[in-house]
Image: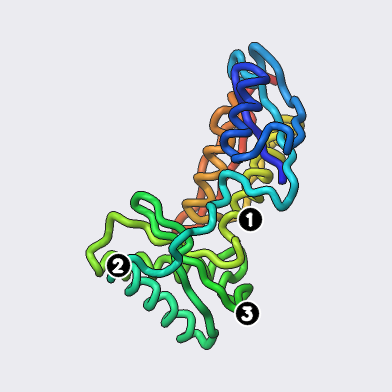
Amino acid sequence: MIYEFEGRTEKEAIDAAAEELGLERDSFDVEILESLTGGLFKKGKVRIRVHTPDEAPAAKRRSANENPLPADEFESKVLEFTKRMIEGMGYACEVKVLFREEKKLGIRIDSEHASIIIGKKGKNLDALQLLANVYAGRLGREDLRVILDSENYRIRREESLVRLAYDTAEQVRRTRQSVLLEPMNPFERRIVHTTLNDIVDIETKSEGEGLYKQVRVTFRGKI
């Protein structure tokens, strides 16, 4: 896996990578991308690229939940609702709690038909997730967000979007031509915006209507 980090010094950037990825310093390789006091990146920033083994869990990978069984009636009802939705589509599955965070409940879907449940670019999974959140709201939990995942799709998609964002920024800087990315849901667009937010010569904005909008990446530095 490849990730990128920034710090005021090389050591600070490496320490940040080790802490966020939950890895020992000698378990990943570091490539210095930028070490500048000004210019393309914020003043006093060192930017590094971290290469980790594919099997090494990143901070973005949530640790296995110690209690995958429902902890209360609400969780039990949401799990049952999710299972009924998928079985109503004609696919057998098992569901369990993937993680619990403040205002978030992750649900893992295990099925031999995971690719169909996920759908092209995760659209089936997004639709199921939307329905699960509507149901959670009807149970009085509008404050909590239900996140459905299968085959670690959400994590893999997030990593792919971070790489896409950096690669696109480099292309835009090189060509001075803006790039319009594929349609994405709000969560995916936020990943792209956040990833490129600290790069001072790159600008991002969402374009389009509806849930699935596109992110335009534009060069705004001096030519």
Question: Extreme top residue here?
Answer: 37
Find residue 112 and name its label.
3
Residue 173 left/right relative to 203: right
Q: How is the image coloured?
A: rainbow
The picture places residue 182, in percent across and down from the top left corner, at 62, 54
- Amino acid, disc 3: Glu
Question: How many C-alpha atoms fall within 10 Å of the one at disc 2: few (<14), some, or many (≥20)?
Answer: few
Question: How many C-alpha atoms fall within 10 Å of the one at disc 1: few (<14), some, or many (≥20)?
Answer: few
- Amino acid, disc 2: Asp
The picture places residue 102, in percent across and down from the top left corner, at 35, 49
Question: Extreme front residue here?
Answer: 66
Residue 219 left/right relative to 134: right
Residue 178, visible in the rendered structure: no
Q: In what element is the residue under mark 2?
A: loop
Please report the residue visible at 52 percent of the width from the left and 64 percent of the height from the top. 149
Q: Nearer the viewer, residue 137 or 212?
A: 137
Q: Nearer the viewer, residue 181 or 63?
A: 63
The picture places residue 94, in percent across and down from the top left corner, at 51, 77
- Amino acid, disc 1: Arg
Question: How many C-alpha atoms fall within 10 Å of the one at disc 3: few (<14), some, or many (≥20)?
Answer: few
